[in-house]
Image (cartoon, grey):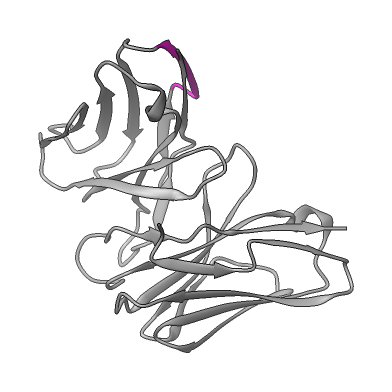
């Protein structure tokens, strides 16, 4: 069982649609992450939030818009996506970010996104 | 940017055989983490190594961090079908103040019963 909950588990959307991915954790972690994972590839970091503030944007296209409403929630708003954006989107959290050594990250089950 | 190179990409073993995956970096790593991702699942944190020459064990899994902190390995003794999955090493990206994790390409382990 994962302590990081992602919804929906699967999403199929057209290129003109607007949708949002949601992530929730109740471990008191103050760092949250979005990763993109293509088949047979490692996770690629997209965004890092630390204490609800965006700390890292890995040059992600603006059609992906992250939001951190509070310390437990992380959203990823999607608009005008392209077929190559089809992938598994993983949310992760860790106690802290940006101090000392990297901390273990707890991943959610992910959202499998298909763009038609 | 920092890359951690991981080999082999695939490994097929007979159940009961041992398995090892290796991770190498061109620069010194402050720490390295290992994750396991089952087919259709998500990465699950296994362990973090911090000290030079560190060796940690979890049941049949043995993790090592090289003396120079540039390489690491994961060794599984007597594999079982439950060990199937992709094993990733992950290290910090190089550069001052960089705390992002960079994942190796992973080693996909198949276990033949």
Question: Which quadrant of the view contains residue B25?
Answer: top left
Residue at figure coordinates x 80%, y 67% from the top left: A81
Closer to the camera in the image, B82 or A32: B82
Q: Residue furthest bottom?
A: A69
Q: Quadrant of the N terminus of chain A?
A: bottom left
Closer to the camera in the image, B98 or A45: A45
- Identify whether B46 is placed above or below B10: below
- Identify whether A102 is placed above or below B6: below
- Identify whether B7 is placed above or below A8: above
Looking at the rendering, the stretch of residues picked out in magenta corresponds to: B8-14
**Left or right position of A106 against A39:** left
Residue at figure coordinates x 51%, y 79% from the top left: A74
Residue at figure coordinates x 82%, y 61% from the top left: A82
Give the tally of numbered discs.
0
**Left or right position of A93 against A39:** left
Q: Quadrant of the C terminus of chain A?
A: bottom right
Closer to the camera in the image, A43 or A90: A90
Residue B20 image offset from top left, x and y in percent: 32, 20
Residue at figure coordinates x 43%, y 46% from the top left: B103
Residue A10 image offset from top left, x and y in percent: 69, 60
Magenta span main SS: strand
- Identify whether B84 is placed above or below A85: above
* Residue A34 seen in the current view: yes
**Left or right position of A97 against A55:** left
Residue B95 image offset from top left, x and y in percent: 34, 58
* Residue B1 seen in the current view: no
Residue A39 image offset from top left, x and y in percent: 64, 41
């Amino acid at each position: 069982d994962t302590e990081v909950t992602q919804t929906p588990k699967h999403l199929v959307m057209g290129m003109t649609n607007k949708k949002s991915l949601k992530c929730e954790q109740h471990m008191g972690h103050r760092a949250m992450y979005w990763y993109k994972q293509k088949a047979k590839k490692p996770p690629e970091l997209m965004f890092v939030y630390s204490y609800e503030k965006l700390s890292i944007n890995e040059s992600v296209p603006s059609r992906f818009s992250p939001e951190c409403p509070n310390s437990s929630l992380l959203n990823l708003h999607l608009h005008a996506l392209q077929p190559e954006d089809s992938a598994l989107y993983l949310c992760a959290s860790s106690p802290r970010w940006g101090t000392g050594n990297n901390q273990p990250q707890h991943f959610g089950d992910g959202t499998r996104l298909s763009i038609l | 940017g920092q890359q951690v190179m991981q080999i082999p990409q695939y490994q097929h073993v007979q159940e009961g055989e041992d398995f090892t995956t290796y991770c190498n970096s061109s620069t010194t790593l402050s720490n390295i983490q290992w994750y396991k991702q089952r087919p259709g699942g998500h990465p699950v944190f296994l362990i973090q190594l911090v000290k030079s020459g560190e060796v940690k064990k979890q049941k049949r899994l043995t993790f090592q961090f090289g003396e120079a902190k540039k390489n690491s390995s994961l060794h599984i003794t007597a594999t079982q079908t439950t060990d199937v999955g992709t094993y990733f090493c992950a290290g910090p990206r190089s550069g001052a103040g960089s705390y992002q994790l960079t994942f190796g390409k992973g080693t996909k382990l198949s276990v033949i019963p």
